[in-house]
Image (cartoon, rainbow, N blue to C red):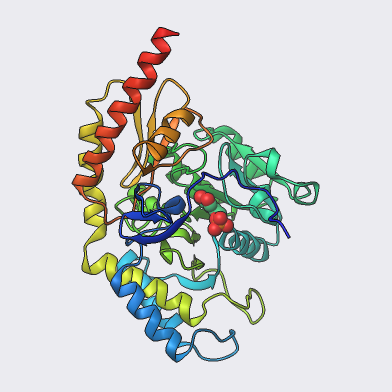
Amino acid sequence: MSLFNVYPLFDITPVKAKDVYVYDANGTKYLDLYGGHAVISIGHSHPTYVQNLQTQIENIGFYSNSIQNPLQEELAQKITALSNCKYYELFLCNSGAEANENAIKLASFHTQKKKIVAFKNGFHGRTSAAVAATDNPKIIAPVNAQQEVVFIEYGDVDTLTTTLAQGDVCAVITEIIQGVGGLEEATTEFYQTVSALCQKFGVLFIADEVQSGFGRTGDFFAFQKHDIEPDIISMAKGMGNGFPIGGILIHPKIKASYGLLGTTFGGNHLACVASLSVLEVLQKEQLLKNAQIISQYFTDTIAKIPQVKQVKGRGLMLGLEFDFPIAELRKELIYKHHIFTGSSKNPNLLRILPSLTVQKQHIDVFINALVKVVEGITSNSKVI
Ligand SMILES: Cc1ncc(COP(=O)(O)O)c(C=O)c1O
C-alpha cells in the first residue's frame, strides 16, 4: 500500500533530534529554525519531557474521559498560573483544528446562531467549520462550504459592524498574528474594536492561539499585548512539544453541560504530562524571556542585510520578507547549509519558528548562511 500523496516532501529523513538540532539517517546535523511548524517549543527531546513521559507511560498512558484524571486539573492550574488567564475553564482535545472546531461549536451552542466572521488570509485548520473559516477556497470541500462564513479585511470596522449588527453571527474568529497567511497583525485599536463589537452584539470572540500561544511571541498568548479578553482561546502546537494535544480556554459566561463537548483521546494522561512538562520547562528556563531576547537580537542583526525588506511577527514567530520568491533560498538553506526554515502563503516570506530554547549562536549561523545564499541568488539574477 502506498501513502495518499498530499505532502510535497523534502528529501530528508530525520531519525534523531536534540534541542534545536535534527539528525538524518546519514548523521547529517540540521539546525531546526522551523520547529516542525511551530510545534517544538522547549527543544526536541528535552530531558525533563522525555523523563516525565517515560515515567507516565510506565504507570498509565491512556484512559478515556469517563474516570477521574487529576493531571487535567493540574494542567488547568498550571496554564492559569503561567498565562494569568484566571477565570477561564479548560477543555482538552488533540489538535489545532479540533480546538477551533470546538470553539466555534461552543459559540454556536451559546448564542444559538450559526454565521461565522473570519478574516482574509486567516488559517484555522482543515476540518468542518475550521476550514470553512479559513481563507483558502482550494482546501474547502463542498461539504464544508455549506457553513456560513463572512471574510473581512483586518481594519475594516464598517463591514464588521454591519455584519455583526445583522444579529445572526455566533463568533468572530481570528489569529492575533497570522501564521500561514504571512505574519500579518492588526492594530491594538482594531482588536479592541472587534472585542467591543462582539460584546455589543452578543457574539463570541475566539482568539486562535494555536500557533502563537504557549510563549511563542514572548507573551504567553499573543492577544495579551493588545489588552483584550477573548471569550474562547484555542491552543495546540507548542502546547505538547510534539505530543498531539490541543485545547480551548473558555470564559465562565459559557456554561458547561454533560455531553456538550467530548473526545476519546483528548486530555489523556500522556498528553497532559507532555503539556505539563512544556510548562515546567518554559518556567524553569525562563523561555518567554529568552524568546524576547533572541527576537531582539535576531531583528537587530537581520537589519544589516539589505535584501531583507521587512521583518514581520513577534518573539520567535517571525517572517523575513524579500522582494523575490523564497522557494529557492529555502531549498539552499536546507540542502547546502542544513538549516530548516518555513514558508507561507506570501511567496516572498521566509518563516522562522524555532524552539524557544534557541540561542544567539544559532541565529549567527543562520545569518551567515542567509547572507551567502541571498548574495548568490541576487548576483545570479543580475547576470540573467
Ligand atoms: C493558527 C492555526 N490554527 C489552526 C491550525 C490547525 O492546527 P492543526 O494542524 O493542529 O489541526 C494551524 C496549523 O497550522 C494554525 O496555524
The answer, for residue 80, to whether it is visible in the render is no
Residue at 48% across, 53% down = 13
**Horizontal and vertical percent position of residue 176:** 44, 46
The residue lying at 58 percent from left, 36 percent from top is 120
Q: Is residue 169 visible?
A: yes
Q: Say which of 291 and 351 sits in front.
A: 351
In the shown orientation, is residue 194 left or right of residue 115?
left
Using the image as rendered, state which of residue 117 and residue 265 is in the foreground.
Answer: 265
Q: Residue at x 41, y 64 (%)?
A: 241
* Residue farthest front in this picture: 26
Where on the picture, by quarter, is residue 370?
A: top left
- Relative depth, front residue between 312 and 62: 62
Q: Quadrant of the C terminus?
A: top left
Q: Quadrant of the N terminus?
A: bottom right
Q: Quadrant of residue 266?
A: bottom right
Residue 220, position in %: x, y? 34, 58
Residue 279 horizontal/vertical position (percent): 33, 69
Residue situated in front as seen by the camera: 37 or 246 = 37
The total of numbered circles placed on residues is 0
Rendered view: 263 above or below 330: below
User: Measured from the top left, where is residue 185 in percent x and y?
Assistant: 43, 38
Left or right: residue 238 compared with residue 364:
right
Relative to 175, is 375 above or below? above
- In the displayed structure, does residue 144 sit left or right of residue 34? right
Residue drawn at the location 60% of the way across and 89% of the way down: 66
Looking at the image, is 114 positioned above or below residue 285?
Answer: above
